[in-house]
């Protein structure tokens, strides 16, 4: 090579996922290391012919920002690259992405198989909204091998919807099992795993989605969702998304690209802190059980080891003192903060039975696996010793 030639950039296939997060979504030829914020909602089309072409193209970068926006596109490219996907579409939130997939792909008379261990908003959409549109949903236990496949109605089931690890009890779904289902479109909400934990598309799953509001954005300053998969499927989602209007904000996309750059070290530290907190809790008489896939006590620990490169910082545990103990714990922490969401720098604690799930009956709670004493914790980036000390003191 002569000194005037620039070396070829190293190919993605040669790199570890953590290395990809450092450059993913930076357009070729862009000298700026940081992402560029395109606030514009509209763009000079140049000519009517170009305008006509762009109005109907999911790849139009500069037409109208509900259709596409260069900063949002950069975030989409970054996630597609990390997922090993042909394409991605960003949404205004994780729920925007979930609603976009379900309502964008299903019609009246269609059937969905979903697991019963699901994020609360997803559950409300499937159980409360889908029936209004004549879409039937069957719920199964996602931890049981073959449960999804057994519930599929050939010719009627349009979607099989899974979440792994599932919120809030960290139940796992075997991605090979899910990816082996042919016929319906298989979808995974992989918010808790992030693309650094596993790449569901490599297991044969059709669509992977995330609330990037959580660990991917990672700083509690971006409300964002994203779906990745084959280009044809993403194009179909795009057609509904421009009418749904849940388009991602350029500023939040910028924050999320910034967040992706440090996803590896953040996830590693949060996962290690969660395991340390979990071990301290397991040794404490006030605690009935602790759930984190990195703990040997997790019922699917082996699957977790096989399937995930790393685990995040979310864990849950059950306090022997029940409702009162759970509420007291959240009131007693001094470093951890009582707040919902997860994957950010601050360690957050929630008590579902007295907040998000307060309206549920004892039976409904039991069905979801949440006990009156269940506490969910999202470990942040404080020093592990300080987090463990705060938790033990609050007990
Ligand atoms: C938070 C969350 C969602 C919803 O995402 P938003 O960005 O809050 O709309 C969906 N799924 C899981 C697993 C979540 O944790």
Image (cartoon, rainbow, N blue to C red):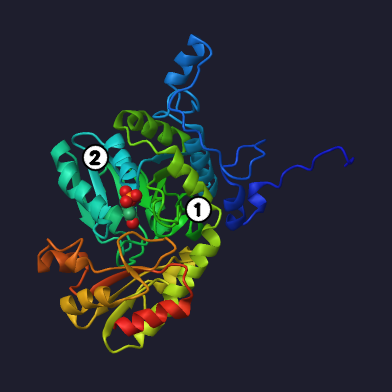
Q: Nearer the viewer, residue 186 or 382?
A: 382
Instruction: From the image, state whether disc 2 or disc 1 is nearer to you.
Output: 1
Q: Badge 1: few (under 14), some or many (20 or more) residues near its Cα, within 10 Å?
A: many
Cα gap from disc 2 to disc 1, whole angstroms: 40 Å
Horizontal side of residue 1 vs 78, given as left or right? right
As helix, strand or loop, the secondary structure at mark 1 comes to helix
- The location of residue 176, given as percent across then percent down, is 43, 57
Position of 312 relative to 325 (above/below): above
Whether residues under marks 2 and 1 lie with C-beta atoms below 8 angstroms apart, the answer is: no
Is residue 257 depicted above or below 291 in this figure?
A: above
Quarter of the C terminus within the rendering: bottom left
Q: Residue at x 46, y 43 (%)?
A: 253
Task: Give residue 281's quadrant in the image.
Answer: bottom left
The answer to whether 320 appears left or right of 215 in the picture is left
Q: Which mark is residue 156?
A: 2
Task: Look at the numbered disc 1 and say if its residue's Cβ is closer than 8 Å to ligand 1.
Answer: no
Q: Which mark is residue 259?
A: 1
Q: Name which quarter of the figure residue 318 lies in.
A: bottom left
Residue sitting at x 47%, y 37%: 72
């Amino acid at each position: 090579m002569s000194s005037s030639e620039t070396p070829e950039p190293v190919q993605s296939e040669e790199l570890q996922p953590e290395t990809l997060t450092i450059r993913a979504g930076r357009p070729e030829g862009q000298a700026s290391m940081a992402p560029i914020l395109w606030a514009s909602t509209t763009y000079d089309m140049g000519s009517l012919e170009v305008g006509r072409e762009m109005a109907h193209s999911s790849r139009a970068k500069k037409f109208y920002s509900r259709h596409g926006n260069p900063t949002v596109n950069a975030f989409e490219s970054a996630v597609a690259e990390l997922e090993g996907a042909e394409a991605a579409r960003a949404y205004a939130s994780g729920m925007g992405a979930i609603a976009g997939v379900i309502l964008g792909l299903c019609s009246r008379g269609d059937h969905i198989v979903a697991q019963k261990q699901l994020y609360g908003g997803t559950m409300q959409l499937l159980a409360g909204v889908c029936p209004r549109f004549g879409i039937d949903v069957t719920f199964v236990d996602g931890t049981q091998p073959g449960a999804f496949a057994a519930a599929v109605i050939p010719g009627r089931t349009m979607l099989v919807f899974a979440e792994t690890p599932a919120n809030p009890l960290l139940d796992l779904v075997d991605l090979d099992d899910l990816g082996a289902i042919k016929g319906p479109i298989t979808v995974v909400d992989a918010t808790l795993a992030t693309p650094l934990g596993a790449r569901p598309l490599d297991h044969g799953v059709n669509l992977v989605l995330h609330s990037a509001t959580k660990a991917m954005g990672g700083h509690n300053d971006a409300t964002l969702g994203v779906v990745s998969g084959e280009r044809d499927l993403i194009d179909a989602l795009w057609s509904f998304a421009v009418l749904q209007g849940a388009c991602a904000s350029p500023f939040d996309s910028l924050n999320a690209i910034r967040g992706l750059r440090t996803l590896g070290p953040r996830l590693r530290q949060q996962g290690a802190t969660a395991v340390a907190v979990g071990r301290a809790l397991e040794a404490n008489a006030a605690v009935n059980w602790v759930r984190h896939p990195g703990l040997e006590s997790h019922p699917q620990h082996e699957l977790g080891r096989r399937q995930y490169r790393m685990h995040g910082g979310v864990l849950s545990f059950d306090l022997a003192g029940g409702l009162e103990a759970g509420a007291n714990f959240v009131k007693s922490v001094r470093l951890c903060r009582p707040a919902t969401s997860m994957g950010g720098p601050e360690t957050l604690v929630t008590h579902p039975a007295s907040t998000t799930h307060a309206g549920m009956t004892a039976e409904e709670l039991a069905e979801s696996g949440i006990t009156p004493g269940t506490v969910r914790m999202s470990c942040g980036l404080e020093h592990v010793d300080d987090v463990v000390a705060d938790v033990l003191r609050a007990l």
